[in-house]
Image: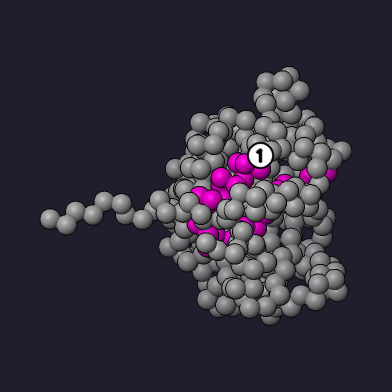
Amino acid sequence: MTDRLYYKYSDYLKDKYNNKVYKIPVNINTTCPNRDGTIGFGGCIFCGEEGAGFELLDKENSIKKQIKENKEFIVKKYKAEKFIIYFQNYTNTYLKLDIFKRYILDSIGDDVVEIAISTRPDCITDDILLFLKEIKNEYNININFELGLQTCNYKTLKKLNRGHTLAEFIFAVNKLKKYNFEICTHIILNLPWDDEEDVVENAKILSGLEIDTVKIHSLYILKDTLLGNLYERNEIKIIDKNEYLKMMVLFLEYLNPDIGIQRLFSRAPKERTLFCNWDTSWWKLKDQLIEFIKEKSTYQGKKFNYLEPKVVKNN
Ligand code: SF4
């Protein structure tokens, strides 16, 4: 039994850096190969025109300016001392190598301990990895890749129009591990085509692959998207809030307790969504989740024993 209900990201960072560390999101001029026809057209069916970055600064501002503005705010508000520069929106490795290099070099500073790069599993080249390895060694900066996966159910991945299956994700993880880079994975736990078994398998696969952190998303439905059309035509069903909380608990129970939880619920501007978080604020959902975990006397990793060898033949 543990007294930790789940491994909060703030604790994960404290354990890792022994300091107050905050993330600074930056927005660069890129797009996604699943939108422009290179891999697919139209993108994932849930993705809106602006990708995932609703709260980002203007991408026309230089990286240095974005970092400076964000940093001033965070230092004042939270007395932060160390920073993670987070390339958040779209596919941040989908750039010419020299442009990518310039962005990364512009983000380095004495108080930067980590660079987090959000991208697709099928968009990571050796050139990029070799360059980042040099950065890691020269500046003593950790490199963290945030990979969108959303589900391990390869049939659902097809329905989502992700443009890759589970195999590409596993391949990318193995590759990043060889470079000693860290990996965060994005996962959605209420996809209309997934059931409890899929949610458990998500936790087991991420644990088996020794992912470092996870961002859990509750599926929201944006207006003017293919998913939005399905929703408006009543062709998909979103599980109710209690069922969702049960899914989350299940996921956490099967997840390795050493995996940090970077996010528990999605956030999206109400005016752009047809559905988001059962019209409940994310902090209320978080309170309800915690209450539910306590009621069930459970915790992250309670059922994490499935990777141990079970068959030992003595003679
Ligand atoms: S890979 Fe990411 S940015 Fe590209 S379409 Fe899908 S969700 Fe949007």
State the image quarter where residue 11 is shown: bottom right
Q: Position of residue 38 (x, y in %)?
A: 58, 38
Q: Camera-side residue: 33 or 225?
A: 225
Query: Which SS class for mark 1?
Result: helix
Residue depicted at 67% across the width and 20% down the height: 235
Closer to us: 47 or 301: 301
Q: Is residue 245 magenta?
A: yes
**Circle 1 Cα neighbour tier, 10 Å, few/some/many (<14 / 14–19 / ≥20):** some
| Residue 151, quarter of picture | top right
**Which residue is at the front of the view, 20 or 239?**
239
Compared with 74, 96 (above or below) is above
User: Residue at left 43%, top 63%?
Assistant: 178
* Residue under pointer 1: 244
Q: From the image, which quarter does the C terminus lie in?
A: bottom left
Disc 1 marks which amino acid? Tyr
Is residue 117 in view? no
Q: Is residue 24 above or below residue 190?
A: below
Is 191 magenta? The answer is no
Provide residue 241's location: percent of width, then percent of height.
Answer: 71, 37
What range is drawn magenta here? Answer: 244-269
The answer, for residue 292, to whether it is visible in the render is: yes
Residue at image location 60% in from the left, 33% down from the top:
160
Residue at image coords 69%, 61%: 86
Q: Is mark 1 within 8 Å of ligand 1?
A: no
- Residue lying at the far bottom of the rendered structure: 110
